[in-house]
Amino acid sequence: MDINLNIFTNSIQTAPDISIVRQTYQSFCDTFGEIPTTIYCDSHPNTAKFPEYFKNLKEYFKNCEVIHTNSLSDGYLKSIKNSTANYLFQLEGDWIFNGNINHSLQELIKIMYKNSIYHLRFNKRANIRAGWDTIFNPAEIDGFKCCISNNMSNNPHIIDRNRYITEIIDDIKLKQGSKGIEEELNARKKYFSCLYGPENYPATVTHLDGRRGR
């Protein structure tokens, strides 16, 4: 089973500087190693700086395809349709990993495949019932301790691409900005996410929040 990394970034107010997305990529590689990667770059909101930002991305990610998009959902949909991998790591370009993930990607996708998990998420807070995690059930699946939630958050996650193609993709809507994915899937009230780690497990990712550049 194969897995590809998709990084979603956009031309924020700090463009053409790409240090945030570089930090995200380095953190991913430090945690999981290098895997085939595609960069999806939204030209908004700082469209004036987008050409230079896009150029800098292409120069840094020399061995990756860098694709121009018009929104997060545009890139997300393209990432599912364009890829041929069985699993996709969907990573917005302003997150880092906290050093407490104790499984390899191959171990994680093996668990996902064996147990029909289509959305495995890494949490920005400790694993507790909070925010959009209104349904929250600790579980142990083949020795893998996790929590089951109704929240299909955009926070760093792995998806089963085939399940998305056949069952889920039609519920994702093409919208501007960062809309069109998580709130659409959550509104259906039929999908569930698997959170990495048992109940109360500390946050596995930290949001750098590229919008702070405003």
Image: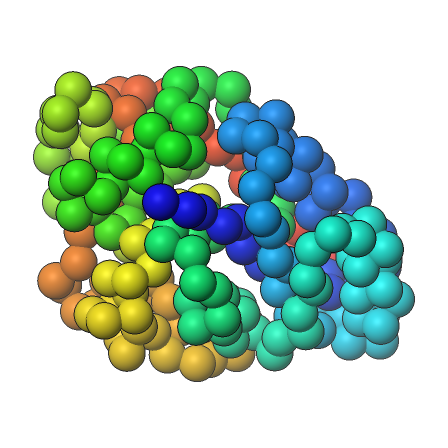
Q: Residue at x 42, y 46 (%)?
A: 2
| Residue 140 location, quadrant | top left
Viewer can see residue 15: no
Q: How is the image coloured?
A: rainbow
Q: Quadrant of the C terminus?
A: bottom right
Question: 28 or 71: which is nearer to us?
Answer: 28
Task: Residue 211 in the image: state x and y as whole percent.
Answer: 65, 55
Front-most of 179 and 96? 96
For residue 15, above or below residue 47:
above
Residue 107 spot, x, y in % from top left:
33, 29
Q: Residue at x 17, y 58 (%)?
A: 191
Relative placement, left or right, of 37 versus 49 is left
Closer to the camera, 45 or 66? 66
Residue 64 to residue 124: above or below: below
Residue 30 seen: yes
Q: How many marks?
A: 0
Q: Residue at 69%, 47% (x, y): give it.
A: 21
Is residue 135 found left or right of 153 in the rendered image? left
Image coordinates for residue 204, horizontal then vertical, percent: 43, 28
How far across and how far down the image is residue 146, in percent? 21, 29
Q: Quadrant of residue 208?
A: top right
Of the pair 25 and 71, the residue shown nearer to us? 25
Residue 1 figure quarter: top left
Left or right of 137 on screen, residue 43: right
Relative height, residue 189 to residue 122 (above, below)? below
As drawn, 117 above or below 177: above
